[in-house]
Image (cartoon, grey):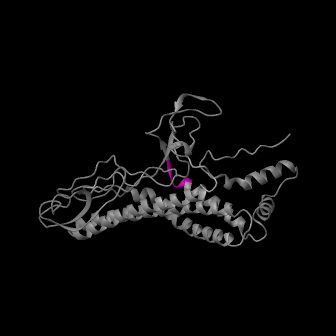
Amino acid sequence: MGAVIAGWADEGLHPETFWAGYATGTAVAWHVAKPDPRILLDSFFNLFYGSRATLMAQVYQLMSEEAQFWADSWEWAPSSARKPIFGNSDRVFDPPKSAQDQTLSLPPVPAPSTLSVDLEWKKDNDRRLQLVFKYMLDNGELKDLLKKNLGRVKLNRYNLEVLASVAEIYEQNLWMILDLGRINTLLNSADVAVKKKRPQDAVAALDHALDLAENIRQRRNLTLRQVTATWYKTWYPRVEAANGRRFVHVLDDVKDHLPDLTVRCGCRLAIGSKKWIWFETTLRGKTVCPRAKIISTGWIRRPWCPREWARGWIEVTADQPLGTGMQPLDSRRPLFGVGVHG
């Protein structure tokens, strides 16, 4: 007779997040009386973190609720980029099942000539945006409690560092959804400004929307660097090449393990966009298009972006429709990455 606690990192989590399950699950296996989960956890917190830890039950409750929202805030859809799943530990699928990817709908791209937008995105995402504010407050409480305990506990401090890094992932996701809502509001504002014949206001709204999109990308990258630095204190990094040998990465087609989507193992932190930056255009000479004066320009530094591409917002004269002469970028090039594993 015995007990096996089967928990490891195949879902992308750091194993430091599993200790409560390891300890309490094993304790229940050794004691036949009906356990009280609160007593089990309190005993675990006291033994694992020491007597100076405070409000750890609230920390774990908030971690669980934030994790659930992180998962629920995304949709699942059949993957268009990965091969079907062959099977799992239970059976071979006949026929193979489509792999599932997490996805998040993006605000609509304005019409090139009128900047009109579809209003359905706001209706479809109202509930998601409302919940973000609630979980933002919870995330602030969670991070404060983790910071307080990091200043108090003597035992297993690294465990709290990992929990704090996961809280950063929660926060990045919340800010991303909030900024998508703000981008949608700005796109609607640009639409209204065109209808009221205020092209400068329309351009300002679009410029702000693009800045927010870039902020999403920068916050994603910063969070990824911070999480990677914390997790690699105890993990050997997975890399594409080392010691003269190259890792041949073949996507997993059994059980659909999330960390196997990329060579490096970590957490999914971002969404992919195939259709933003509809107004970035090549600057030819001093004008973007006839009778249009450049208001502001600035080089956009992106890994996929050739040097000749720059951002140029224009002030359109009264006799020229907004959007004339603008060339959209290749829609296959993403703005800020695909679900990233660090």
Left or right of residue 284: residue 238: right
| Image vertical order of residue 303 relative to residue 250, above or below | below
How many discs appear?
Answer: 0
Residue 14 colored in magenta in the image: no
Say which quadrant the N terminus sits in. Answer: top right
Where residue 288 appears, x then y in whole percent? 18, 60
* The one of 10 and 212 positioned closer to us in this rendering: 10
| Image vertical order of residue 111 relative to residue 144, above or below | above
* The one of 193 and 84 positioned closer to us in this rendering: 84
Where residue 134 appears, x then y in whole percent? 55, 67
Left or right of residue 303: residue 73: right
Q: Residue at x 47, y 38 (%)?
A: 82
Residue 289 falls in image quadrant: bottom left
Q: Residue at x 76, y 63 (%)?
A: 45
Where residue 116 appears, x then y in whole percent? 27, 58
Q: Residue furthest right?
A: 32
Q: Residue furthest front?
A: 244
| Residue bounds of the magenta highlight | 71-75
Left or right of residue 68: residue 20: right
* The one of 121 and 174 positioned closer to us in this rendering: 174
Where residue 164 appears, x then y in whole percent? 61, 63
* The one of 99 and 265 positioned closer to us in this rendering: 265
| Image vertical order of residue 122 relative to residue 1, above or below | below
